[in-house]
Amino acid sequence: MRYNRLVKHIDFGIVVMYMYAETKTHEVTVDVVIFTIRDRGLEVLLVQREQEPFKDAWAIPGGFVRMTENLDEAAKRVLYERTRVQNVYLEQQYTFGDPLRHPKSRVITVSYFALIRADDIHLSFDTGLNVQNVDWHSVYELPNLAFDHDQIIKHAVRKLRDRLEATPVAFQLLPKKFTLTDLQKTYENILNNRIDKRNFRKKIMSLGFLLEHNEFSKSSSKRPARLYSFNKDVIESKKGIFI
Amino acid sequence: MRYNRLVKHIDFGIVVMYMYAETKTHEVTVDVVIFTIRDRGLEVLLVQREQEPFKDAWAIPGGFVRMTENLDEAAKRVLYERTRVQNVYLEQQYTFGDPLRHPKSRVITVSYFALIRADDIHLSFDTGLNVQNVDWHSVYELPNLAFDHDQIIKHAVRKLRDRLEATPVAFQLLPKKFTLTDLQKTYENILNNRIDKRNFRKKIMSLGFLLEHNEFSKSSSKRPARLYSFNKDVIESKKGIFI
DNA sequence: GCAAAAGTGTTCAATGTACACCCATGC
DNA sequence: GCATGGGTGTACATTGAACACTTTTGC
């Protein structure tokens, strides 16, 4: 029963079925939770499935791990294929391997999360070669998700919050130069709560990774805000994979 | 070249080789870094390999993930097979998947770490059914390790330290009743540094998960020390897998 | 001149850190 | 009675949290 369910989508004949049952090979994928900050706050990039299983449900971008690439490389590739962005923060978070998580076969997925600037991805959407239905969704209002992708996203949000408390990853979600209010809003969106402006600024400035510029945002119709950028020298001593 | 290396150990014939090259199935194992506290401090359980590759080198206990079990179950099973202990702290930590990490095939391993009481495992060694060379090794003086197991152990030690700062996992390494000095030594062994006795006691007592007993250690020839145990009610709200 | 966001300090509480002596027991 | 590990408190520094008004600009 289970055995049939597990192998029926493989179509190489009996020898492969035998291998599938008796040896311990599995399909291995990487799934990448791609975070950005947009109008509705912290959002993730989802792809609407065009095939069964879970046709029309939304899913995290993912793909099979190839034999010649390591897991980080696979995650980078999936990310690049979907978004055409490179050189972003990417971190392995957890591996999901319930035998029933994929209804048709045993698929073990190594999940990652990535942080990208909303700006960067706009570019790639313009020149995009993916005609699939791809869209951003607020992590606080997710649509129906395929497989166990709701779990994976929840896990990614938790891990992102942990990271944020420990290391300055927030700048990965911002343009090169940003205002302190931008930065604070990024923190608030990720942590999902309000922060006192004065305390936030005091804390952030004390960490010493901000570079002050003599430029000001000429955005709206209010008092211009000073622009800052992150000091790479400080950042480089931190963990995470920069691809 | 790479292709041959990757498939040569599989002996089901050309159809399987074809599958191996064109689809994305991999061998998936779990490896469990089993920690305990013994005479030399924080130690890990290692198995000496009897076959190539890495014959005679030491390795973390591991095994293939079966088709019908999830990853946690696989880790529990491997742990039970090696140590006959159950109901211990077990946590997934990281997945290693470099294509070259195993010299004969593509093996992706989901690594876990476990915390067990040195006492418990003595029992299982007595009745042990494993006649392989199995022994404890200080994490600070490791022998030659097979594959990338040195990396896996390093990662596990980092993760264990993180856990220790966040949640009271140390009691997993101690007998049910223990003295505050035992507990402090456990912390010191894991963190690899000295802690001030008064500050440690103040901090630990303020966390409120210790249950004070009216029993005293009648160990050596000095003043008897009061025994404590962990308050389960507090512990149960914490994360980690208790199997 | 007014609406709107930028910018700025102080006080208090809680937590962490440094540090030295007496106590209970076995021998 | 002495050697050994058990047990205890205080002072100071650091960090986190609460809280309100002035400044600069576009309109």
Image (cartoon, coloured by chain):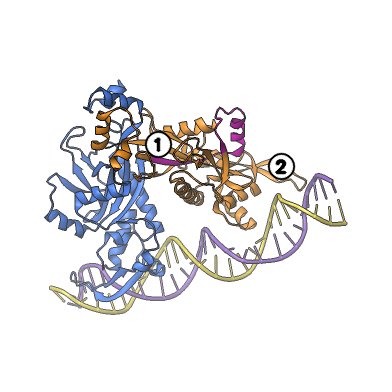
Chain colours: A blue, B orange, C purple, D yellow
Where on the picture, by quarter, is residue A7?
A: top left
Q: Residue B23: x and y, percent?
A: 24, 36
B42 above or below A205? above
Residue A241 seen in the figure = yes
Residue B223 at x, y = what percent? 76, 48
Name the side, left or right, on which B238 lies relative to B43: left
Type of amino acid at the residue the image marks with label 1: Thr
The numbered mark at residue B216 is 2
The residue to which callout 1 is attached is B29
Residue at 50% from the left image edge and 42% from the top image edge: B57
Question: Residue at left 50%, top 35%?
Answer: B50
Q: CA distance from mark 1 to mark 2?
A: 45 Å
Horizontal side of A125 relative to A116 (left or right) equals: left
Residue type at mark 2: give it. Answer: Phe
User: Label 1: few (<14), some or many (≥20) within 10 Å?
Assistant: many
Q: Is residue A72 above or below residue A220?
A: above
What span is in magenta? B109-134
Circle 2 crowding by C-alpha within 10 Å: few under 14, some 14–19, many from 20: some
Nearer-the-camera pick, A80 or B214: A80
Subunit ID for the residue under disc 2: B
Relative to D6, is B66 above or below? above
> In the rendering, at what x and y percent does residue A189 appear?
30, 56
| Mark 1 or mark 2, earlier in chain | 1
Q: Say which quadrant the C terminus of chain A sits in.
A: bottom left
Which of the two discs, 1 and 2, sits closer to the camera?
A: 1
Q: Do the dots labelled 1 and 2 sit on one chain?
A: yes
How many labels, in total? 2
Q: Could you tell me which chain the residue with mark 1 belongs to? A: B
Secondary structure state at the residue bearing disc 2: strand
